[in-house]
Image (cartoon, rainbow, N blue to C red):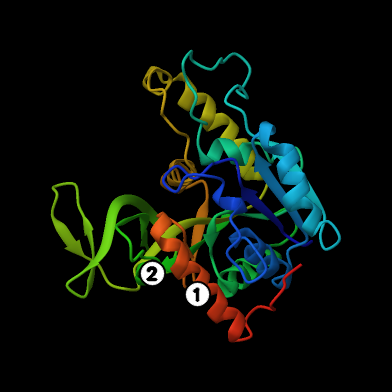
């Protein structure tokens, strides 16, 4: 069974302003998402599912879905802050979505096969889709609790315009994930990759340290765990009082690893991540995409 690609497109890009998913960066106005989908098609994915905000549907269908429909089946699902399990209501004054794992839950009705989850506005690169596609396609029918994450080498994920936030991964000797610690300030300083630790000290880390760029591989049993854990999350008064609390994928994954419920294999990739974290990043991204097209990695026109 071909795996599905589940694209998180409900965010608006807080730091960059505007709908960065729709920002044309390729030679013919291609978006970063176009390149991800092209790479996924080459890597054997068989269906696309997008989670978006309902008020964005018409724009999305006209500008995005119409491009891919002849190439691969597409489904749309919607994330809303009021979409909560029975017995819970959204606190008054909350406007922020409930986070990436809440967005993942929206896919449950339409995803019945192994699936990968990605951000729409990150350029992950061809190799990363190949390693994830191979992992998901090789899972036996009905597989459960055997997940994966693409571990990018931290040195391949930095921005020239400022610090970045990354989930630094701990792994065991089998390359299974043991922890993900979000480090909110990482940059190259004095020729080394360093992050600011909890005591405000800059700590060096090897160039090849795996980091999470939110590229996960799951099977449908993950939805059940997420539903249960989300109820626990909402039952904690702290999370209801804090109008910005979020149910993130690493939070769920961390619990499943610590409980011994699931394993998450960290898949190494040579791909260089890039994205538009800051508006100043845009020209460099346009140039990087053009250089990949010039090198024959992508055709001039994708779809």
Q: Quadrant of residue 226?
A: top right
Q: Please provide percent x and percent y for residue 222.
A: 61, 44
**In the rendered image of this protein, does residue 224 appear above or below residue 274?**
above
Give the secondary structure at mark 2. Answer: loop
Give the number of the disc on residue 229. Answer: none
Q: Position of residue 13 (x, y in %)?
A: 49, 45
> Which residue lies under the disc numbered 2?
173
| Horizontal side, residue 14 vs residue 203: left or right | right
Question: Which residue sits at x=72%, y=59%?
Answer: 3
* Residue situated furthest bottom in the rendering: 295
**Residue marked by disc 1:** 288
* C-alpha gap between disc 2 and disc 1: 34 Å
Foreground pick, 193 / 248: 193
Q: Is residue 256 above or below residue 4?
A: above
Is residue 266 shown left or right of residue 118? left
Of callouts 2 and 1, the N-terminal one: 2
Q: Is residue 165 visible?
A: yes
Position in image of residue 11 (x %, y %): 54, 41
- In the displayed structure, 70 sits above or below 98; it is below
Quadrant of the snapshot with the C terminus: bottom right
Give the residue drawn at x 62%, y 37%: 105
């Amino acid at each position: 069974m071909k795996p599905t690609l589940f694209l998180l497109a409900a965010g608006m890009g807080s730091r960059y302003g505007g709908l960065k998913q729709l920002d044309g960066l390729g030679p013919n106005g291609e978006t970063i998402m176009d390149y991800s989908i092209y790479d996924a098609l080459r890597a054997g994915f068989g269906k696309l599912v997008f989670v978006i905000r309902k008020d964005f549907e018409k724009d999305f269908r006209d500008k995005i879905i119409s491009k891919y429909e002849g190439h691969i089946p597409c489904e749309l699902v919607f994330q809303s802050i009021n979409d909560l399990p029975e017995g819970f209501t959204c606190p008054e004054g909350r406007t922020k979505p409930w986070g990436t794992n809440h967005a993942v839950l929206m896919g449950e009705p339409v995803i019945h096969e192994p699936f990968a989850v990605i951000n729409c506005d990150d350029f992950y690169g061809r190799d990363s889709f190949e390693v994830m596609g191979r992992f998901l396609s090789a899972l036996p029918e009905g597989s459960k609790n055997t997940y994966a994450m693409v571990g990018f080498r931290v040195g391949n994920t930095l921005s020239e315009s400022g610090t970045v936030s990354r989930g630094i991964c701990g792994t065991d000797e089998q390359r299974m994930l043991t922890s993900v610690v979000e480090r909110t300030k990482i940059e190259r300083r004095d020729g080394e990759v360093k992050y600011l630790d909890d005591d405000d000290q800059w700590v060096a880390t090897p160039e090849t340290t795996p980091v999470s760029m939110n590229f996960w591989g799951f099977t449908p049993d993950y939805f059940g765990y997420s539903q249960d854990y989300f109820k626990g999350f909402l039952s904690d008064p702290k999370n209801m009082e804090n109008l910005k609390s979020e149910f993130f994928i690493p939070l769920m994954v961390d619990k499943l690893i610590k409980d011994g419920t699931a394993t998450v294999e960290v898949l190494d990739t040579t791909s260089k991540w890039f994205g538009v974290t800051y508006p100043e990043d845009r020209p460099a991204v346009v140039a990087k995409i053009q250089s990949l097209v010039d090198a024959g990695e992508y055709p001039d026109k994708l779809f």
